[in-house]
Amino acid sequence: MKNNLSYILAFGLLSFVFASQSCQKMDIKIETTGDVNIVGYLEKYPDSFSLFKQILDRTETSAFLNAYGAYTCFAPTNTGVKTWLTKKGAGSVDAADLETLKDLVRFHLLLDTITTSSFKDGKLPVPTMFSQYLVTGVSNKGGQSSYLINRQALVTQSNIKVGNGIIHQIDNVLEPSTISLVKQLEAKPEYSIFVQAIKETGFYDRLNTVDPDTSKRWLTLIAESNQALADSGITSYAALKAKYSKTSSPANANDSLHMYIAYHILDGVKFLGDIITSPAHQTLQPQEVVSTQLLNSEVIVNEDEFNGVVEKGVTLIRNTSDNAATNGVWHDAGAHFSVKYRKPTAVYWDVSSFPEIMKLAANYKKASFTWTRQSEANQPIKDHYWGWGTLASTNIFTYSYSTTSSVTRYAVNFDCNQLPLGLPSRPIWWEMMTPPIIKGKYKIWICYSRSKQSSSSNQLCQVTVNGELMPRTINFTDLRPKGSDAELEAIGWKQYTEWREYRTDSNYAGKLVGTYEFMTTQKQQIRIIPITGTQNNNFIDMIHIIPVDENQVLPRFSTDGSKKYF
């Protein structure tokens, strides 16, 4: 995949495992052609692509696809184009609406080279040039598995490598969404109760608006069908209002019906594959989140265990979810759910799992990768920032991966984040935004891998949480002290890794930096600031944010990321 940081997305992305056990394993083969570029390949096979080539010519797209670059093109065959033209009432490419053709071309092109290795039953890691995402899945018919794009076209030949990118041949034309979130639901009578609640609570306009600023445009809506509501005894809007509206004014932000709808709307575009990347997602209801997890290949919201009792969650129905709209995506909830007011919950944050490295399939959990900032304005990684030092050449951030290296061999997923720190020539601080943390009082543990080559550097750092200075400092070159779990916890240390044979070695250490009370449920800011010394080998593996009244020592974590309660 092309390492072009200008195309790195701001959205959280993670591969989503295939759900259907009936899907056969499909080999990923890359076919290299002798053609210079995408246009040359299409011209070579007129029996398959002459009509798509005509579309490129008429929209004046052939010129830039004839030049150097790195693109992914989903190329519909002549049969697919003919079907689409008939649907549009156009007898030929020349008779079709020009603006519609331009949109069509943009929807079939991505500004990156994406092979089928990124087709993980969810949205692709980069948007199309039309600024909407494509969703991939698997179709299984008669024992034959094929990739399905946007539920509209099958991939009939994949991973065709040309000089300026990758081509995937598809059997139909892909059509972008032209309807907003709420308009899509409004057109479906089976969601009439939920739509009426959207209108009465005042969220209709927001869910119908396509903000020209794409940083503000996207929303994710979890919709409840009439059947899901009926299963909970709610058979009309009047019944829904009677259950929740306590002020008789659903548009009032303090009304429980208003809160119910706000709780079903997430900020940002989050397909199912995005939803499972975080244990919680903030809703439009202030300070409240929905929890999410993947259980038996199903995406479940709000299934949690409190005091040993499992509260059953709600499944997002896969084949009726991931519905792209002009201003976001909506999912279909398998049952009714309301605002869940939560107690503080531990977050065991693997800081090396972030969208920009996950997007690099050749590196994530495979090989190290380094980002270098060329200017202070350059910000290649969302939610990870580092203060500008005097020498740009040392303003680097490294994702460090190895199964044998002394600093990653027993780390979670065999990876860590490495960042040089210290004046005058290194970054002057390192700041991260956490996943959403439920409001409450927590202990903050920095879990790191000590570089054996760095013991003489003795760099001392302080940590702030949302700008508040934590009382304990941290030195990434310190060994974890010896002692029992209780003895270590008493002096602010713990072992966070699971490997029994490594317990006698203290290079993997969890250091308590302080206690902090989060007043709102949201992402929080953690900053590490060097006080004295300079150091290139600061390796952070995890940050544990644990409610003060919960076990601070367990679970431990294995190299595959699994939790161990012993």
Image: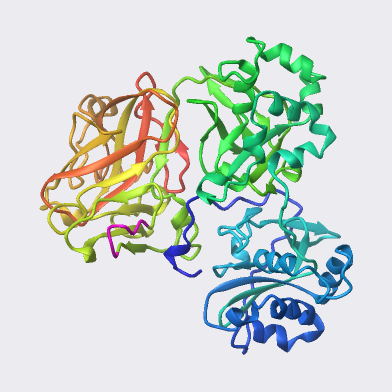
Quadrant assignment for the C terminus? top left
Please tell me which residue is depicted at 74% across the width and 41% down the height of the picture.
183
Residue 244 in picture, x, y percent from top left? 67, 14
- Compared to 331, does 174 lie above or below? below
Residue 258 in picture, x, y percent from top left? 62, 21
- Compared to 303, does 320 lie above or below? below
Residue 380 highlighted magenta (yes or no): no
Relative to the observer, which residue lies in front, 223 or 298?
223
Residue 289 in picture, x, y percent from top left? 53, 29
Answer with left or right where residue 201 lies relative to residue 81: left
Relative to the observer, which residue lies in front, 273 or 178?
178
Report the magenta residues as a range.
374-379
Question: How many numbered dots are placed on residues in this image?
Answer: 0
Relative to the observer, which residue lies in front, 33 or 403?
33
**Does any portion of residue 311 appear in the rendered image?**
no
Relative to the observer, which residue lies in front, 448 or 94?
94
Answer with left or right where residue 16 lies relative to residue 140: left
**Does any portion of residue 486 appear in the rendered image?**
yes
Please tell me which residue is depicted at 79% across the width and 22% down the height of the picture.
231
